[in-house]
Amino acid sequence: MKTSSLWDLGRSTVLILTAAAIAGCGDGGAKPVVSKSSAVSARPSKDGPGEAVMAANVFTALVTDDGSKGIRSIDVGDLVTGSLDATDNQLDDGSYYDAWMFTLASPSQVVVEMRSSAVDAFVTLYRGKPRALGESVGYDDDGAGGTDARLVASLEAGTYTIMANSYGGGDTGEYELSLVSVGNVTAPAPGTPAARTLLPGNPVEAGLAAGDPTFDDGTHFQAWRYSGRAGERVTVTMRSTQVDAFLLAYRGPLEAAEWLAEDDDGAGGTDAAVSMVLPTDGTYTFVANTYGAGTTGAYTISLEVSEPRSMEDMFPGGGPSDGRYALLVGIDDYPGTGNDLRGPVEDARIMRQVLVDRFGFDADKVVTLTDSEATRQNIANGIVRHLGQAGPDGVAVFFYSGHGAQMHENIGLTGALDPEPRGDGDEAIYVYGTSRESSVILDEELGYLMETLDADRSLVVVDACYSGEITRAPAGSPQPKSVSTDDPEVASHLRLPTRFIASEVKRLSDLTDLSLGFGDVEAIAQAFASPQRHLMWGASTEDQVSWTSHLGNGASVYTYFLGERLMSAPMGATFAEVQRDVHSDVVGFIEQDGNMTMQNPQLRGSRAEMTLQEFFRQR
């Protein structure tokens, strides 16, 4: 069993990327116009092969004046911000540039990245200081993906100048520039600290040795860092024929790491993989580890980056009406820093394994949303567009693990139409909104969305606090999975919905902002008064909190036991029978642990006596 924190870091000291901005100054002199090539008189093409090496005598004059912002410095490990504007120097193609200078004390391989949402980034690296530049080391236009630039170069000790530029003449806007060392160019031994930086698309061969630091369970580990951007979908894979691979993911450098996720065998066999959407810009640490204490051996680690998924990528549609579809949501990392969890992403992985391995769901029909991808918009679209593919002969499963919330007031249906049995406020699942804000999906909205599906078999499983009536269907150290909307940390990020998800969703191909109005409120109330077609499993009653745990790879208490029972129960077992076993498991574990308040899993719906085989239509 793995611990979800970094312990003795031993000799694992590494160079980290920090977010330290360097301010500049200058005297506002004239701006020289310089050609990028002395070989041609016409404006050079930035994607032409002739620019790989540029004439040194041209660039001795590249920065002959400080310009309005001056010559600025960047240190190895820095992430700095800048802007291209009309006060900057220009090249003969009309593009503006900034000059950044750095010095290396010893030979090193460096990575220079320029990222911007305002300009098409173009970066060039030269030997020497501004006003006395030597040859060009290299240049790049879009090596970091999209319109972002990345240049990797092996350099001798000395001084170098980075030209932060744009591909288009006259383009202006803000950018970020980072400089990181990937290690000494004399190729250090595999796995030494100087070599531990991950680059997209560059697998690294390394090895765990007896001298590496250990966790408290006796397993050796090595740490790898990556400088990431918010919204990037990152997949890190660790493969080995000599050790049982185990991966852990953290936000931040080692000395201030925040646990995000971990995996044992997600890449198949004994190989591990962690996939996530990065919540913020900054440094991320991925720890290569083993499942067995004291084991050592060679491994390969790689990192791949893909653009954020579009709605069409997440929910392509077009599936058969008799298909079986699942939407799984797990949120470990929430906006802010005070409400993160350990367990929900692992819970979603458990449910995926249950559906695919036990009940034979097609893997491509099981969609998982984690962390910042789990927005109100994406979840609603996932239910309508993905689960909505299931017709009367199909199956639809929705699973959520994360925080639950009590709203203390009714912000959905009110008055005579209010389905709340006690009139003391809505329950909700706590999800992402837009622009890194948080939001909620009300119990009434979730229940109504599920009732609008055509599937004859619909199941909702919610592992959150106050989940006993989350759809209003009838009949580590542990963490409570609840948030208070009165908490200042929550309130600073929370934007409550102003419109209710109503019956119009059935006619939309894409829910953009969910501003649909309250629609046919009587139809919504009717669905709540007599919902018949979905079965609801909740981790606790509407008054109880639910808990994470150290079980398995750090799963929540309820999902861990639910997964165990669903994997082992006879196909002829009913939901009610499985519920009795899961309830007994959860209650027994909490009583024995002694550190958690009680949670009593709930099963509601008219099909509780249906067998697993009948419901899931296992083929």
Image: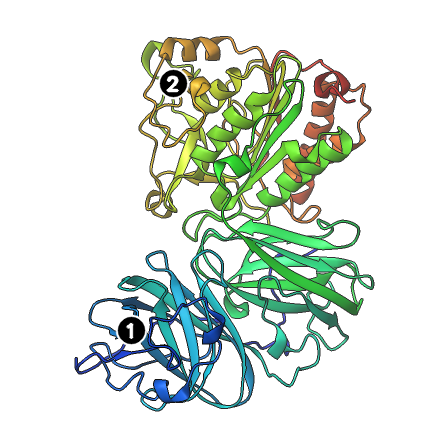
Above or below, comparing residue 260 to residue 378 in the picture: below
Q: Residue at x 35, y 91 (%)?
A: 132
Residue 30: percent from left, percent from top:
17, 81
Closer to us: 277 or 558: 277
Q: In this figure, which residue is indicated by the disc labeled 1? A: 92
Q: Is residue 448 above or below residue 480?
A: above
User: What's the colour scheme?
Assistant: rainbow
Which of 116/171 is in front?
A: 171
Q: Amino acid at mark 2?
A: Gly
SS label for mark 1:
loop
Q: How many marks?
A: 2
Quarter containing the C terminus: top right
- Say which residue appears at 52% left-offset and 34% top-offset: 465
Q: Amino acid at mark 1?
A: Asp
- The disc at residue 454 is none
Mark 2 or 1: the one toward you: 1
The residue wearing badge 2 is: 423
Tell me how far mark 2 sits from mark 1, CA to CA. 71 Å
Viewport quadrant of the N terminus: bottom right
Residue 212 vertical position relative to residue 288 in the rendered view, above or below: below
The residue under the point 61% across, 60% down is 303
Question: Where's residue 496, x and y in %?
Answer: 34, 34
Which is nearer the eye, 140 or 388? 140
Tell me the quarter of the picture where residue 210 sits.
Answer: bottom right
The answer to whether residue 419 is left or right of residue 264 is: left
Q: How busy is the neighbourhood of tag 2: few (under 14 within 10 Å), some, or many (20 plus)?
A: few
Front-most of 47 and 118? 47
Residue at the image position 21 percent from the left and 81 percent from the top = 26
